[in-house]
Image (cartoon, coloured by chain):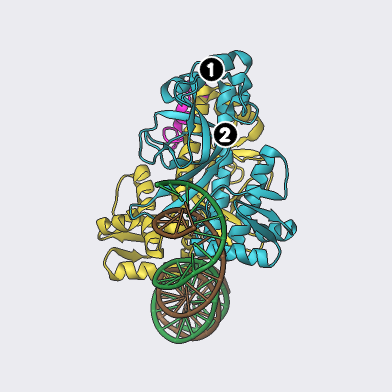
Chain colours: A cyan, B yellow, C green, D brown
Amino acid sequence: MKSSLPAGQLEELLCIDCAVRRSGICAALDPDELQELDRLGRHVHFQSRATVFAQEELATSFYNLIEGVLRLYKLLPDGRRQIVGFALPGDFLGMAVSARHGFSADAIGPVVVCQFARASFSQFIADKPHLLRRINAFAARELNLAQEHMVLLGRRTAEERVASFLIGWRDRLARLKGPAQTVALPMSRQDIADFLGLTIETVSRTFTRLERDEVIEIMPGRITFLKAARAEALAAV
Amino acid sequence: MKSSLPAGQLEELLCIDCAVRRSGICAALDPDELQELDRLGRHVHFQSRATVFAQEELATSFYNLIEGVLRLYKLLPDGRRQIVGFALPGDFLGMAVSARHGFSADAIGPVVVCQFARASFSQFIADKPHLLRRINAFAARELNLAQEHMVLLGRRTAEERVASFLIGWRDRLARLKGPAQTVALPMSRQDIADFLGLTIETVSRTFTRLERDEVIEIMPGRITFLKAARAEALAAV
DNA sequence: TCCGCCTCTTGATCTAGATCAAGGAGATCC
DNA sequence: GGATCTCCTTGATCTAGATCAAGAGGCGGA
């Protein structure tokens, strides 16, 4: 597997050594299949703010996120933005319903993806029920997250939304890196607002209020839970 | 295939004659496979307001909706409700992420489902890549709808939400029954409110305003589009 | 025919969160 | 070391939609 960047410099990377080999969809594959997959995918690096793919663009590839964080969002014609999710290493992207992407994905910080041409990957998975079942499970998990988020957007208060986001993010990072009370927030306040259906001011004020109540401590690019139980209660209601 | 209701009365129903045979996931199956499936599923009738399955309940079955409309919703502990979707004939339900259902489903009007025991259906699909791919496509479509709905809940005004709902509902019914300017609304105003993240009063007022502007005409249990283009414009923005 | 029970509509008022506005605190660049 | 950005916070004010309240209209049951 060849890396596309830094330009001219080639890395030999094999699926068998992949960082997300156990957490991604590829966990469903045996060593022979992984070798076959080595020939289909290539690593692509993106710098912060770069666009991996854009809404309405022809969906010519699938992607496994290897490293970094992606912001997934939909735009309305007048510029209103809704972030539909943040992707983390191990996430699988590109299951478009039509020929075109339903949302845009761009990098929050440096990112590495494993890119597969749609046609060859489709052919690769076509007769692999174990892999199809795993992709199914991933889709079901995504759908479940989406439905939880609908409840948040439709029926929760600003404070509940923010607490819910922080707890949810902490738990996702915990699954990747192990539990911790301090969690990195690589996304901006505006990103959080556009994820939670709020304005940046409301997010900022809610952060401040949670800090004043000693539920969290705010630091640049991260927060620490001081009273995790209190935050969990707000998130659960 | 035996029908569970009316009690004591048995219908012989074969998958090959099924009303949703072409639109549901079963469209992926050949005649032999349909015969095999005949032995796994059974038709179950529900009357209006009956619960097909409930959130947190053990997910022991999959369901194909054959006839009628289901309301799919999540409840918060304090009773706030978010409807995550309405199911129509051809829809496939039961892809729970865990052992338990993530949402409740109940009947809006009389309903017929085709029910499959989870274990035997899982076994049935396990080695059928064509069926797995179709289930995948269904899941991707659901996910896409969910993401569209997140935009609606997070970033749209009440008027846009209502117009968007009416147009979306019209288009789904059109796919089932052919296009029409009059569309049945079997769900209550409260259901619509809980789907759109609004209150019943706001939904009612918005309907009234759309009628006053001669965009729609309101009739009991249904509406007619008078200026479909105007409604589509509101829905699209 | 009347009663009780719904669902839906409409009006008055309130408020959570949006909008408008003004800095402050770091970065990055010459 | 100052200029310019970008991101974040905070304050003042506004408003879309929520909440509170009161019917209206339908429908089934006896």
* Residue B47 visible within the image: no
Q: Quadrant of the C terminus of chain A?
A: bottom right
Look at the numbered disc 1 and give the secondary structure of its residue.
helix
Q: Which residue is mark 2?
A: A67
Image: B218 above or below A75? below
Specify the amino acid type for callout 1.
Answer: Asp
Image: B94 above or below A63? below
Q: Chain of mark 2?
A: A
Percent of width and height locating residue B69: 48, 50
Specify the amino acid type for callout 2.
Answer: Glu
From the viewer's perspective, is the residue at label 1 or at label 2 nearer? 2
* Residue B148 visible within the image: yes
Percent of width and height locating residue A51: 42, 39
Is tag 1's residue or tag 2's residue first in the polypeptide sequence? 1
Q: Chain of mark 1?
A: A
Q: Nearer the viewer, residue A23 or B9?
A: A23
Q: Which residue is mark 1?
A: A38
Count the marks: how many? 2
Report crowding for label 1: few under 14, some 14 to 19, many 20 or more residues within 10 A (C-alpha): some
Percent of width and height locating residue A140: 57, 38
Are the residues tagged 1 and 2 within 8 Å (C-beta)?
A: no
> Could you tell me which residue is drawn at 67 percent across and 46 percent down?
A171
The mark found on residue B232 in the picture is none
Whether the magenta-drawn stretch holds residue B25 is answered as yes
> Could you tell me which residue is drawn at 72 percent across and 50 percent down?
A181
Report crowding for label 2: few under 14, some 14 to 19, many 20 or more residues within 10 A (C-alpha): many
The stretch of residues the image draws in magenta is B14-33
Whether the magenta-drawn stretch holds residue A104 is answered as no
Q: Nearer the viewer, residue B190 or A101?
A: A101
Percent of width and height locating residue D5: 41, 54
> Could you tell me which residue is drawn at 31 percent across and 68 percent down?
B211
Spatial CA span between label 1 and label 2: 18 Å
